[in-house]
Image: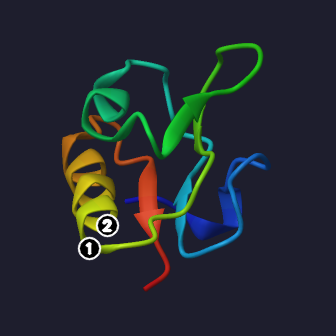
Amino acid sequence: MADPKHKQPENANGKWYVDSTCVPCHVCLDEASDLLSYAHDESHVYFKKQPENAEETKRAANAMQACPTEAIGDDG
């Protein structure tokens, strides 16, 4: 389960986040590439944009479910 105490610093402000357990496997980007992005050094992924509607929220939730390291969380 993602730990809000270890959020990646690049995450956009909001309830969705990626924590430090992320390994850049690309699985989440297959689900929500409009919301997530690789860090500059490609060492992890972060939320570049928070979901703004039901469809984007569904894609964020799908990315969270697909994450093999459970690095995606939401504070909602």
Residue at 26% in and 53% down: 59
Task: Label 2, secondary structure: give it.
Answer: helix
Residue at 35% in and 73% down: 53
Which quadrant holds the N terminus?
A: bottom left
Task: Label 1, secondary structure: give it.
Answer: helix
Give the quarter of the image for residue 14. bottom right
Residue at 33% in and 60% down: 56
Q: Mark 1 points at which residue?
A: 54
Amino acid carrying label 1: it is Ala
Left or right, 17 with respect to 10, comes to left
Q: How crowded is mark 1: few (under 14 residues within 10 Å), some or many (20 or more)?
A: few
Left or right, 6 with respect to 30, comes to right
Give x and y (percent) for residue 3. 54, 63
C-alpha span from label 2 to label 1: 5 Å
* 55 vs 29, nearest the viewer: 55
Q: Mark 2 points at which residue?
A: 57
